[in-house]
Amino acid sequence: MKEFLWYAFAFLAVGGGVAMVTRKNPVASLLFLILTFFSLAGIFILLQAHFIAAIQVLVYAGAIMVLFLFVIMLLNLGHDYRSDLRGGGWIVIGFAGAGLFGFFVSRAFRGPDLVVDHGGAALIDRAVAEFGAVGAIGIPLIREYVVPFELTALLLLAAIIGAVVLAKRRV
Amino acid sequence: MLLNESLILAGILFSIGIFGVLIRRNAIIIFLSIELMLNAVNLSFVAFSRAMGIDGQVFVFFVIAVAAAEAAVGLALVIAIFRHYETLDIKNFNLLRW
C-alpha cells in the first residue's frame, strides 16, 4: 500500500514538474508546481517526516507560491500567450539537461543501492516517541544547530528589509 | 524501504528544474524552476535522514527558510526590473554582458 501511494505521488510530482516547465501561461505553471509540492509533502509523510511535510505545505505551497501569485497579479502577467522558449543552442543545452533526467530514470532499473542504512529510522522514531514530532526537530535546532538558527533569523530580517527597499517606488 | 526510489525521484525532479531554467525566457518561470530544484534537494535530504538520523530534516528546515527569503528578495527584484523594462523577457537584461 505504501509503495502504491509512493508511486502515485511520484508520478504526480514528475507530471506536475514537466507540465510546469512547458506551460506558456505563468499562472498555469505555478498551479502545476503547487501540485508537485503537495505530492512531495505526501512523499515526506510516507518517509515519516511529518513536521517537514506540514512545513512544506504551510510555507512552500502556502506562502511562497501565494507570493509568486501576487507578483504575477501585480505585474499583470497572465495574458501573453506567446511561446517564450529560448531558441538555437539553448535547446541543445536544455536537452543535455534532459539527458541528466534520462540518466536518473535509467538508475531506477538497474544498479546497486544508493543509500546505506545506518539505522537512522530507529533514532528518529525514538526521538519522536519521546519529544513528539515537533520536538524531534526542535530539540536539535536549539541544541546543536543554534548558531545556524540565529543566523537564519538574521537572514530573514535582511530579506524583509531588502524586499521592502527594492520594491519601493521612490527610495 | 523507499529510500532508493526517493533519491532517484529527487534526481529526476532536479533535472526537470535544470531543463526549465535553461529553456525558458520568462523570469518568473525560471524562479519556479529554481524552487523545484530546491524541493528536489529537500527530498534527497529527507530520504537520507531516514537512513542516518534527524540532521537531514533539520537541514531541510533551514533550506525552506532560506528559499523563502530568496523568493521574497528575488520577487522584489523582479518587480523593480519590470517597472524599468516593462517586460520580463530575460534576453533584454544584457547590461552586464561583454
Image (spheres, helix red, strand yellow):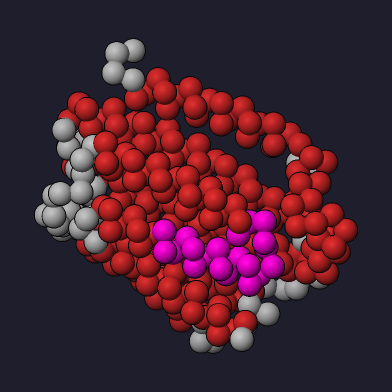
Q: Is residue B91 above or below residue B53?
A: above
Q: Is A157 on the left-hand or right-hand side of B72?
A: right
Give the residue drawn at x 36%, y 36%: B75
Q: Is residue A41 magenta?
A: yes
Q: Nearer the viewer, residue B60 or B22?
A: B60
Q: What is the quadrant of the C terminus of chain B in the image?
A: top left
Q: Position of residue A117 (x, y in %)?
A: 75, 73
Q: Nearer the viewer, residue A108 or B69?
A: B69
Give the residue drawn at x 22%, y 27%: B83
Q: Is residue B34 visible?
A: yes
Q: Is B26 on the left-hand or right-hand side of A53?
A: left
Q: Is residue A56 above or below residue A124?
A: above
Q: Position of residue B24 (x, y in %)?
A: 25, 54
Residue B23 figure quarter: bottom left
Q: Position of residue A112 (x, y in %)?
A: 62, 82
Q: Is residue B93 above or below residue B58?
A: above
Magenta segment: A34-53
